[in-house]
Image (tube, rainbow, N blue to C red):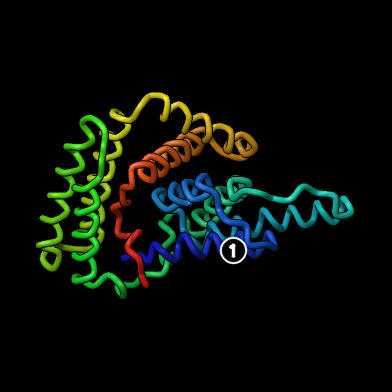
């Protein structure tokens, strides 16, 4: 099972290190990292892209005598990240780049996974959700308990995580259908404003993915819903 937690934290730490301050990542930044993770972008290539972006910024700053605008968002590095990923793929002669994200089973013991699933089931069953999302929340909670009861015999962690992602997509679809229209409009306007400075550095498909992740993250937060993927299981 890939150590997903490290994927996020290492990207955050590298961005903060290169920026020279502990700027907290925004909801938009976290959504962008999720699209990179889900797209299978190797951590090593993402970090290299961040370095390349800041190397160019440092050179530009030096030529301009230090009069260069401060970088305020991870999306600013998006184009450089995609270029680094393409170069990594070329270097691998078309093969998938493996081993970029640390692989580790530690922290994903069956007992902890089962407890995590049961805990999330309770949160879903007790959440005050609108419309059809209420029934879907209870249904997903029941399914989580079923998965938890057979964790040791359920196959690989990747297989479990695929099931969790399907449930999360189902829950998000129901919530998107049931949430008040004005809330959805407000969140979309917010994501558009935050993305505006970076649109020129991102592909259209990536922009759409980030907007979707942004909307899901904010909707889940608004209704107190947990994310279901094993990535969100604390390693502490």
What x and y, as percent, mark residue 138? Answer: 16, 44
Residue at image position (14%, 43%) is: 139
User: Looking at the picture, does residue 117 appear above or below residue 131?
Assistant: below
Q: Is disc 1 surrounded by few (<14), some (14 to 19) or many (20+) residues within 10 Å?
A: some
Q: Horizontally, is 120 left or right of 3 in the view?
A: left
Residue at image position (29%, 35%) is: 175
What x and y, as percent, mark residue 61? Answer: 82, 53
What x and y, as percent, mark residue 59? Answer: 79, 56
What x and y, as percent, mark residue 31? Answer: 47, 46
Q: Quadrant of the C terminus?
A: bottom left
User: Looking at the picture, does residue 107 appear above or below residue 233?
Assistant: below
Residue at image position (24%, 55%) is: 120
Question: Which residue position is annotated with label 1?
Answer: 14
User: Looking at the picture, does residue 34 appear above or below residue 197?
Assistant: below
Residue extending furthest toward the right: 65
Give the secondary structure at mark 1.
helix
Residue extending furthest toward the bottom: 106
Q: Quadrant of the N terminus?
A: bottom left
Q: Nearer the viewer, residue 169 or 125?
A: 125
Q: Horizontally, is 115 left or right of 54 in the view?
A: left
Q: Horizontally, is 188 left or right of 149 in the view?
A: right
**Numbered circles on residues, count:** 1
Residue at image position (32%, 51%) is: 227
């Amino acid at each position: 099972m890939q150590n997903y937690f490290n994927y996020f934290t290492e990207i955050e730490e590298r961005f903060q290190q290169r920026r020279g301050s502990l700027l907290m990542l925004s909801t938009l930044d976290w959504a962008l990292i999720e699209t990179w993770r889900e797209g299978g972008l190797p951590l090593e290539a993402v970090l290299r892209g961040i370095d390349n972006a800041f190397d160019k910024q440092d050179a530009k700053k030096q030529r301009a005598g230090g009069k260069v605008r401060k970088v305020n968002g991870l999306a600013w590095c998006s184009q450089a990240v995609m270029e680094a990923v393409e170069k990594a793929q070329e270097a691998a002669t078309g093969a998938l780049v493996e081993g970029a994200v640390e692989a580790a089973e530690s922290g994903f013991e069956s007992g902890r996974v089962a407890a995590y699933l049961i805990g999330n089931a309770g949160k879903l069953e007790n959440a005050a959700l609108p419309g059809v999302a209420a029934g879907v929340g209870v249904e997903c909670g029941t399914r989580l308990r079923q998965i938890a009861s057979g964790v040791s015999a359920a196959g690989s962690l990747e297989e479990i995580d695929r099931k969790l992602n399907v449930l999360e997509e189902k829950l998000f679809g129901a919530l998107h259908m049931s949430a008040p229209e004005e809330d959805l409009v407000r969140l979309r306007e917010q994501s558009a404003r935050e993305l505006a400075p970076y649109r020129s550095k991102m592909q259209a498909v990536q922009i759409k993915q980030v907007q979707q992740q942004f909307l899901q993250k904010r909707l889940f937060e608004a209704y107190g819903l947990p994310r279901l993927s094993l990535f969100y299981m604390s390693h502490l």
